[in-house]
Image (cartoon, rainbow, N blue to C red):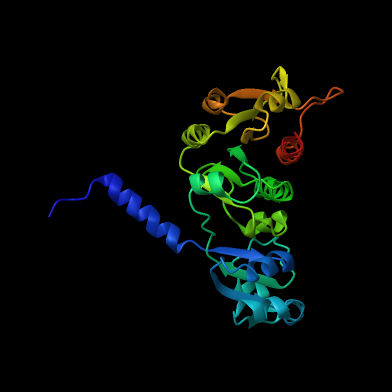
Amino acid sequence: MMKKPSWVIDKERAKRAASAETVWLFGLHAVRDALMNPAREKLRLVLTKNASDKLTDAIAASGLEPEVVDPRKFDAHVELAADSVHQGAAMEVKPLDWGSVEDVALTGEGAPLVVLLDRVTDPHNVGAVLRSAEVFGARAVIAPHRHSAPETGALAKTASGALERQPYLRVVNLADTMEDLRKMGYILLGLAGEAEMTLAEGLAHVGTRPVALVLGAEGPGLREKTRETCDMLVCIPFTGGFGSLNVSNAAAVSLYAATNR
């Protein structure tokens, strides 16, 4: 019997690890939305009596039997960070599977508009971007699998339910995915503070064609390879001496502009 190549072994190992991965969601809002999502694979639901009373309808809809615990012993039953504001509600789930970038970008719900995040690692920023993407009808938020915020309870809480409804796809190589989007007809607009073209001017060039908004992490911004792969670099005009927006705010402004071309 031939020995499997190392890359095949690594791929199989990664697939097993992904299938074994679980996430703890917390907070009444995040847990309620996950309970109401039929696509979410739910494993354990840990609640205080007070939280259980507030989630009665969602629990009934999910068919999941909750573990009702003493509030003083709640932390002993769940795997949450010490500073998690859980409100007496936590649920262990499997990460959502949204399918391929091609399926979502070509035939997904909403306008042909996607957001790509280049190494944005703060879950609160990514959660806020997901929330804005849902509000403005984007088809997906896309980020590299490494050096980006994974699906976590903190991200879900900041997303305020959007994680259950807004596709969040993590890919192996962001530049390759950008090239794939270009082949699908998307125009890639990279947000860069030093760009000479404004966002409005860039969108005017795009017209009615599909748009991919590419944003980098605060500080380093877009990586060189990401910048080179964009069709255009654009900036959000500002007045005054301080001209840098938080990445989630920049995403919201850009999404609003793109949907009101």
Q: Vertically, is 168 above or below 50? A: above
Q: Residue at x 54, y 59 (%)?
A: 96
Camera sees residue 221: no
Camera sees residue 106: yes
Q: Vertically, is 224 above or below 91? A: above
Quadrant for residue 49, please give it: bottom right
Q: Vertically, is 95 above or below 112? A: below
> Of all residues shown, which one is farthest toward the right?
240
Q: How many marks?
A: 0
Q: Residue at x 55, y 48 (%)?
A: 107
Q: Is residue 165 left or right of residue 224?
A: right
Judge by depth and name the residue closer to the eye, 60 or 154.
60
Quadrant for residue 230, please give it: top right
Residue 127: give x, y in percent of width and height.
68, 50
Q: Is residue 20 left or right of residue 252?
A: left
State the quadrant of the C terminus. Answer: top right
Q: Is residue 218 left or right of residue 108?
A: right
> Of all residues shown, which one is farthest toward the left?
1
Judge by depth and name the residue closer to the eye, 74 or 5.
5
Residue 148: give x, y in percent of width and height.
57, 44
Judge by depth and name the residue closer to the eye, 260 or 75.
260
Residue 252: give x, y in percent of width and height.
75, 41
State the quadrant of the N terminus. Answer: bottom left
Quadrant for residue 209, please give it: top right
> Of all residues shown, which one is farthest toward the top?
196
Q: Is residue 62 left or right of residue 179?
A: right
Residue 12: give x, y in percent of width and height.
33, 54
